[in-house]
């Protein structure tokens, strides 16, 4: 590599092929090396995360704790909920907004784990009453409303008239995070609770696989053939070609899960309609894209590229859960409606 100047104070470099770069430009191999290192870290982090999730899922299927479904998944739910909450609140604080991170973390976890309340009956050897007017899902609504008033109560106790507006800002931010993160995380538990033990677990795997495979399909399709920008003012890297690739990948994965995974894991099941995977894969893919773009909106507002550095190559926990947060409730509705049989 030869260095030379042009008399204006600028320094240029000439590489072995004769290509000239100015002092602020890196040769192409630098960019390639950086992208390769990022992809390597991304794949390694994804492999470790998937391995840990599969281990907990296998344990939950084969060796349920206290003969109760879903208890092995508690660490996964806690990690997703707590990590996402920290990432979201960090970005809100970075943008100059007032947020009480401790209170928000507690209320968000309360909403997420409220879906486990019916499990208490199972752990005590009782059967959850079928005629309970709250049902098994109503606890999530109660917890979400309670979270808002807990945050309000906290602000009442600490109110300072000299800092006008701060209490309202903390309340709005806390209520948003508690519901935005907590309710979808609770919906993961609700999907696990569908059907018999094996069916519910297979349905949960299907939802996660369909949503995250759409992320991967969109990423690689966009890298390979992406030309037309999807929404450049919000996320310049996303393309229509990548979106189509993500939908196609999600539909393919849904077919495999609907007609191979679910029948293999369920104790008894009836097959869903042949078109079910097309609808389910499309729902998960498009909802996942909305979740990804929602995170991009917050990042744009705060001027941050990644939500955190917890997972090398992937960013923060929110960079993993963003698509799941948007996709889980529509997916739960579709599964409960029988799109994959039952």
Image (cartoon, rainbow, N blue to C red):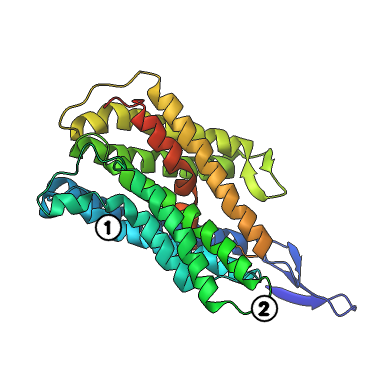
- Which picture quadrant has residue 99? bottom right
Task: Tell me if I can see residue 59 in this picture.
Answer: no
Residue 244 x/y as whole percent: 56, 33
The relative height of residue 44 versus residue 90 in the rendered view (above or below) is above
Taking the spot 48% from the left edge, 31% from the top edge, the residue there is 282
- Residue 250: x and y, percent? 44, 35
Mark 2 to mark 1 CA distance (whole Å): 39 Å
Which of the two residues, 187 or 52, is positioned nearer the viewer here?
187
Closest to the observer, 98 or 92 = 98
The residue furthest top is 274
Relative depth, front residue between 300 and 50: 300
- State the residue position of label 1: 74
Say what secondary structure mark 1 lies in. Answer: helix
What residue is disc 2 on? 163
Residue 24: x and y, percent?
Answer: 75, 70
Numbered disc 2: secondary structure = loop
The location of residue 79, given as percent across then percent down, is: 36, 62
Q: Residue at x 26, y 27 (%)?
A: 342
Q: Nearer the viewer, mark 2 or mark 1?
A: 2
Label 2–label 1 contact, CB within 8 A:
no
Quadrant into which the N terminus falls: bottom right
* Quarter residue 332 falls in: top left
Q: What residue is shown at x 73% (from left), y 63% (from top)? A: 18
In this rendering, is residue 190 above or below 90?
Answer: above
Counting residues from the start of the chain, the first of labels 2 and 1 encountered is: 1
Q: Residues within 10 Å of mark 1 (few under 14, many from 20)?
A: some
């Amino acid at each position: 590599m030869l260095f030379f100047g042009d008399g204006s104070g600028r320094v240029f470099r000439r590489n072995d092929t004769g290509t000239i770069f100015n002092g602020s430009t890196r040769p192409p191999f630098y960019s390639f090396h950086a992208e390769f290192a990022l992809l390597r870290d991304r794949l390694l982090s994804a492999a470790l995360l998937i391995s840990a999730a599969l281990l907990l899922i296998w344990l939950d299927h084969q060796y349920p704790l206290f003969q109760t479904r879903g208890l092995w998944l508690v660490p996964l739910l806690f990690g997703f909920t707590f990590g996402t909450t920290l990432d979201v609140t960090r970005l809100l604080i970075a943008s100059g907004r007032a947020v009480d991170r401790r209170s928000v973390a507690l209320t968000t976890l309360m909403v997420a784990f409220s879906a486990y309340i019916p499990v208490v009956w199972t752990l005590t050897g009782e059967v959850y009453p079928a005629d309970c007017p709250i049902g098994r899902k109503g606890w999530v609504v109660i917890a979400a409303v309670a979270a808002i008033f807990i945050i309000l109560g906290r602000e009442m106790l600490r109110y300072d008239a000299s800092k006008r507006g701060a209490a309202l800002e903390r309340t709005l931010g806390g209520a948003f995070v508690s519901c935005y993160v907590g309710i979808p995380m609770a919906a993961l538990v609700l999907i696990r609770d569908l059907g018999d033990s094996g069916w519910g677990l297979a349905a949960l795997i299907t939802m996660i696989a369909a949503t995250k495979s759409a992320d991967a399909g969109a990423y690689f399709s966009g890298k390979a053939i992406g030309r037309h920008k999807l929404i450049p003012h919000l996320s310049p890297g996303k393309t229509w070609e990548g979106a189509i690739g993500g939908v196609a990948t999600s539909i393919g994965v849904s077919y495999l899960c609907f007609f191979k995974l679910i029948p293999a894991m369920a104790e008894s099941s009836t097959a869903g309609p042949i078109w079910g995977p097309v609808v389910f894969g499309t729902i998960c893919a498009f909802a996942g894209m909305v979740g990804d773009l929602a995170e991009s909106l917050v990042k744009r507002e705060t001027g941050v590229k990644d939500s955190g550095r917890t997972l090398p190559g992937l960013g923060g926990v929110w960079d993993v859960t963003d698509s799941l947060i948007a996709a889980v409730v529509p997916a739960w509705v579709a599964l409960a409606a029988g799109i994959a049989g039952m």
